[in-house]
Image: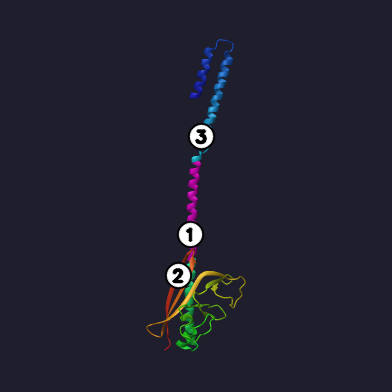
Amino acid sequence: DTATTEIYTLSLHALFRSHNRGFCCSVFYTNLFISKNYRIIMKNTNLQKNGFTLVETLIAVLILTISIGGLLSLAAGGFFSVRYSRNQIIANSLLQESIEYVRNTRDTSFLQGRGWGGWKSSLNVDGSGNLTGGSTDGCFSSDGCIVDPYTSGNKIKACSGTCPNISYYPDNSFYGYSNSYPFTITNPAYQTSFVRTIKLTPSSVTDDQVIVTASISWLNGTNTKIITQKDLITNWTP
């Protein structure tokens, strides 16, 4: 190669210029000096070829950061979607439970011989679930009421302003409002963000119809979600 050619050329040049007994030593030292410089140059060249520059390292770190950030963003979005779907299912189930319970109280009232009027009177209650004797209290009031189907006490209570939050009982996997249940509760319940409200409105068409409006709200992250369901309950007794 070029470096080797230069070494031999300089060696021959030293050979022709030397005419004394120092001929061999002159050639030897010339070759030695050039060979050492050549090795130094080759080592420096290898050092330049190996490794990464600072710019290349920064670009690699930037690409890696963007890739990891994208994956984390996708994972966070997936977790949010799962939580939103779970809360949506729970909210729909709680609404359906409340409407079915109100409908069940009507059927029970008829079976016990209290009739349509007796059933509506049973839903006019105060905050403790006691009958008020009125016609616009409890579930028929503007604040609405709550239903607690599993409690051993009064199952329908009037709300004052905003209805209370529903609690979750992990031992039995159900939602409720109190600790008065006919089963053992070991771990304490914790409050959820679900707020369920039931309102009954007499139909403007006929006295034999009542419109049940059940709504539930909850926090999904920092956003408040609300779902509302309506049902028409009629007086099916002759």
Above or below residue 195? Residue 152 is below
Residue 158, image x, y percentages:
50, 79
Query: Which region is colored magenta?
Result: 56-85
Image spot of residue 125 (x, y percent):
51, 83
**Please, what is the three-letter code of the amino acid marked with disc 1?**
Gly
Mark 3 or mark 1, which has the lower sequence index? 3
Q: Where does label 2 land, which residue?
A: 226
Left/right placement of residue 25 relative to residue 230 reads: right
| Along the line of sight, the residue nearer the viewer: 96 or 138 | 138
Cα separation, mark 3 vs mark 2, equals: 64 Å
Secondary structure found at label 1: helix
Residue 131 position within the rendered picture, expressed as x and y whole percent measured from the top left: 52, 85
Q: Nearer the viewer, residue 107 or 63?
A: 63
Q: Is 66 part of what is drawn in magenta?
A: yes
In this rendered view, identify the residue nearer to me: 8 or 127. 127
Q: Residue furthest front?
A: 161
SS at badge 2: strand
Comes first in the chain, label 3 or label 2 = 3
Query: What's the CA distance linking mark 2 and mark 1?
Result: 22 Å
Going 58% across and 14% down the picture, which residue do you hit?
Answer: 24
- Please name the amino acid that badge 2 sits on: Ile
Q: Quadrant of residue 152?
A: bottom right
| Residue at which label 3 appears | 49
Q: Is residue 168 magenta?
A: no
- Residue 236: x percent and y percent? 42, 85
Q: Main secondary structure of the magenta part?
A: helix
Other residues around mark 3 within 10 Å, as few (<14) / some (14–19) / many (≥20): few
Location of mark 1 (residue): 78
